Amino acid sequence: MKRVSKSVVRTLIFFATVFIGSAFAQGSPNVPLLKQLNSYAGTGYNDCWGYIDAQGREYALLGVRSGTSIVDITDAANAAEVAFIGSAFSTWKDIKTYQHYAYTMTEANKILQIIDLSNLPTSATLVNSFTLNTSGNPHNIYIDTDAAILYVSDDFRFNTSVHVYSLADPLNPVALTQFGPDSHDMYAKNGVLYIAEGSQPSIGIYDVTNPASPSLIHRITIPSAGYVHNVWPTEDQNFVMSTEETVGKTVKFWDISTPTNPILRDTYLAPNQLAHNTHIKGNYAYISHYESGLRIVDISDPDNIFEAGFYDTPDAWGAYPFFPSGKVLISDISAGLYIVYFEGSVEQSSFTANIREGWNMIGLPFHASDSSVSTLFPNHIPGTLFSFDGNYQTESELTPGVGYWLKFPTAEAVSIAGDAIETLSISLNEGWNMISGISCDVSLSNVSDSGNIIIPGTLYEFDGSYQLTDTIGEGSGHWIRASGAGTIELSCASGDLPKIAADPNAELAGFAKMTFSEIGGVHSQELFFGKNLPETADFRSYSLPPQFVDNNGFDARFTGDMRIAAGENAEI
């Protein structure tokens, strides 16, 4: 990721502020405005969050006092609302997401709205209005998506605790416990919960490895503090930033590498001297700073944090910097939604593909700026990129989710970079399909197959010969067989998804086995015979994928492309 020197950034900000003037620009040159939407000007706004659907489309979830506005921002210049879910009227609203659901609450009542986002951009649907068991009307929520745990901050005006719910069933939260002396906002990751403890005034750090039984690790008491409003850790959890919603109180950056011995490393405060919330992504903190708008602070040197960019709005309540594209959302109390861009927020993931000499099954696990095979794999043998759609077809560009054959003259390691793909829907045809993975390894047991179209025992990889596998590897091509046309979903987040059936290989116990190997024994294929499968068995589970593009690979199979002998006269 490109970095700009501190002196250059400060010069740019000074130039934007002093010489351009607010009549011509509201932000520093490195934070341009992409779009503003103010569809509910007479109603008012509050917080915001973001969502990316299975096709990679980006959405702003904008809190409106009368509901939640869902805005497709994929093409920011043409951003438009695609759905609105009404709610009880309230000044306060908080929004978070888990899987393909949005969770929203207001201070008007104890209702947690659960909104199904799976049909975006066509529509969104309110699927449950869940009553929380809080003592007052809740103020904030946070979801640890890895652990499927919802944390709820009770009514912040009455020194109330944190309530913990399981989202094992995303539509029906289950209360686990409540704890803590006071809470206003929180963040959880890797079994640690950070709580901004409001009027205490402190930051509580809790062990929530067992979320039903939290235990205090340490409490940071803030000297001469205001109201401790919000807390957010760095990605490595060695530092945490806190805000105090009190005029003149600084944003503080704490070293918590030793949690029981926190050290205040540096502070920051924008001109209006009243910060609201902070969010951290990479080397930058994104602070919604009320009348000073969005302030982006470089935290790469903990002892010298400084403003790296800004976009001024009348009264910024919330910010969301977690889109891989570099788009950043600002929700303003009176002016609505701002979509800005900051290069430091762009996520460029990378992956190293270990290429073997000859044929390889590959895929593209990122959204790449240039997806041509000549750019991604410059040393490949020209004319050897093939996809499969009932027959092999030559290609020149790679599409995420599609598997390909590609041939190389020698073995090499190839680095590929692009925007991460954390969820992806893949359309399958009846029969064999070549697919590829996303920006993580996905266990077959975590593939969403709501139509039950995947035939168990038919996921194959290639390492010179076909091998059964239980994982769709990042950047790898795979064969998979479907009983009919439909869609499966890959996701880097685990959750309660419809699972595929169990692997049928247990049925092969007691079969005789032959192992065929090439000279040297590097690649092999096992074939089974000498016993009959149960009548209930699906013979398709014991089939082998189509043969190689030019038959130049090690392969052994029974008649009918099977790995078991079907009938008395099966031939190899």
Image (spheres, grey):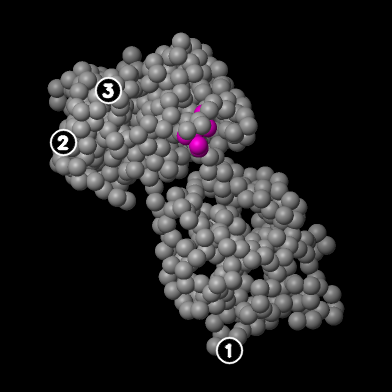
Please give the name of the residue rendered at 66% of the width and 73% of the height, measured from the top-left corner: 549
Rendered location of residue 571, percent (x, y)? 79, 81
Residue 75 sits inside the magenta stretch: yes
Name which quarter of the figure residue 498 lies in.
Answer: top right
Q: Which mark is residue 266?
A: 2
Q: Which of the marked residues, 2 or 1, is nearer the chain's N terminus?
A: 2
* Amino acid type indicated by mark 1: Ile
Q: Which residue is mark 1?
A: 519
Q: Is residue 459 visible?
A: no
Q: Which of the marked residues, 1 or 3, is nearer the chain's N terminus?
A: 3
Q: Which residue is mark 3?
A: 22
Please give the name of the residue rendered at 34% of the width and 39% of the height, measured from the top-left corner: 342
In the rendered image, the vertical position of residue 346 relative to residue 556, given as above or below: above
* Amino acid type indicated by mark 3: Ser
Q: Which of the marked residues, 2 or 3, is nearer the chain's N terminus?
A: 3
Mark 2 vs mark 1, CA separation in Å: 65 Å
| Mark 2 or 3: the one toward you | 3
* Numbered disc 2: secondary structure: strand
Q: Which residues are magenta?
A: 71-76
